Image (cartoon, rainbow, N blue to C red):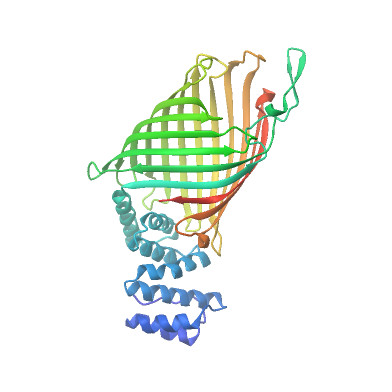
Amino acid sequence: MSLPRAAGAQAPDLISRAEAQVNAGNYGAAIAALEATGPLPDRGAEQRRLWALAMAHAYAGRPRAALPFLEKLVSLAPGNASYRLELAAALDKAGQTDRARYHYDLTRGGRLPASLAQEVDRRIDRIDRARIWEGRFHLAFAPESNAARRTAAETIVIGDLPFRLHPSSREQPAKGIEIGLGLAALPRLGDDLRLRLGGSLDARLYDGGAPDDIQARTELGLLHFGDRNRRLGGGLTFGHRRIASEPYSTSRGVYLTWGQALDAKALTNLTVTLIREQTEYARRAVPEETRSLLAASLSRIVAPRLQLSLGLLLDRTDSAVASQAGTGRAVTMTARYAFRGGLLADLSVTVGDQDRDGPDSLLGIVRSDRRQSVELRLTHRDWAVGGFAPVLELGIERQRSTNTLYSYDNKRALIGVTRRF
């Protein structure tokens, strides 16, 4: 393929000669000339130079050498589907298939020709079927204004008598460390069928302003692939939770998940998950609970640099104690935008409520909670080292309840690194 020129860009003659050398197969001379030129102040000319360098390395069979130039191009022009598609192809050839899949997926928002869109679908399907492991790692420093989600009220009224709350039962700041680790094996059982065997550990460890919270979970399930990005899965889960270094609860459950593209170009995808889980608490005074949950997510790739999603959550908790049983609802709206220069921003807004079935035994109040939260997540694609990307999260959460003990405000910041592999 001949190298396309950036529309309206007036590149120096040296770049034009280098482009001609690339088209003629003289890759070494083109690379030497373009690297000797160095970065150019004109954005259009610099994008032409980087594109020629990337293509010279790619055509010469050196996809890894092409990656730095393609990464820079995607940062400079995140809405350019051609740059992102070439980056995905280079990552694919270099063995970084998960990152390749991410960028292949985003190119769907660039209105690709039908034949090229079909090829992208084929490559994504190949990556999905070839994957035998899934994993994630997350480590962050997370200060919070009210990590334990306690009330700011100083007194509560029981009957007609006011009672002053101990300072340890009220809102207080805490500094914490968040650790998340997950790994799942996907051995092949057939052309379209995989076994899923996984485990995860998520921990929040605080400096004393809030109790430590550690959760471990294992999973055994099946995953089936189909046309139009369809995924059907189901299985069993087992969990254990410890709070303040003491056993808190154990759980066992079943889940069923289904997802599929709603259009031929896979720009819009729907995922639905059903979970039914039983939880037993370490304290014998707390009865067993059964929770049924329905979660649905509708996502849309608007453009290579913009993705939108809408999530709906419905849950029902059944318990022998009416004050623990209840129904909850939540709606989450999320937008991800890639700014020119490499900055990625995710903005999420959640609104939810939960209503209990009956009054509690202490205050005689039927609890009803209303919660709102806003979270901004920032990362920079050019700052990743060894696949680990720095993350900054800022969040505000507010809950108002008919029971003052459960009303709270919390502000949190998170600074850390994350990786999915």
> Is the residue 164 above or below the residue 144 in the image?
above
* Residue at 47% over, 49% down: 300
Residue 406, position in %: x, y?
65, 26
Q: Is residue 95 above or below residue 314?
A: below
Left or right relative to 145: residue 421? left
Circle count: 0
Between 257 and 173, the residue placed more toward the observer is 173
Please tell me which residue is depicted at 43% across the width and 48% down the height of the picture: 268
Q: Is residue 118 above or below residue 10?
A: above
Question: Residue sitting at 56 percent across and 65 percent down?
Answer: 341
Q: Quadrant of the N terminus?
A: bottom left
The reply to whether residue 6 is visible in this rendering is: no
Res. 3 image quadrant: bottom left
As drawn, the residue found furthest toward the left would be 190
Query: Could one spot residue 118 in this view of the protein?
Result: yes
Quarter assignment of residue 143: top right
- Where is residue 29 shown, x and y percent of the image? 38, 84
Residue ID at (69%, 24%): 404
Q: Nearer the viewer, residue 153 or 117?
A: 153
Near-viewer residue (124 or 324): 324
Residue 44 is situated, as x and y percent measured from the top left of the image, at 52, 75
Residue 351 drawn at (x, y percent): 59, 36
> In this view of the protein, which residue sits in the foreground, 54 or 148?
148
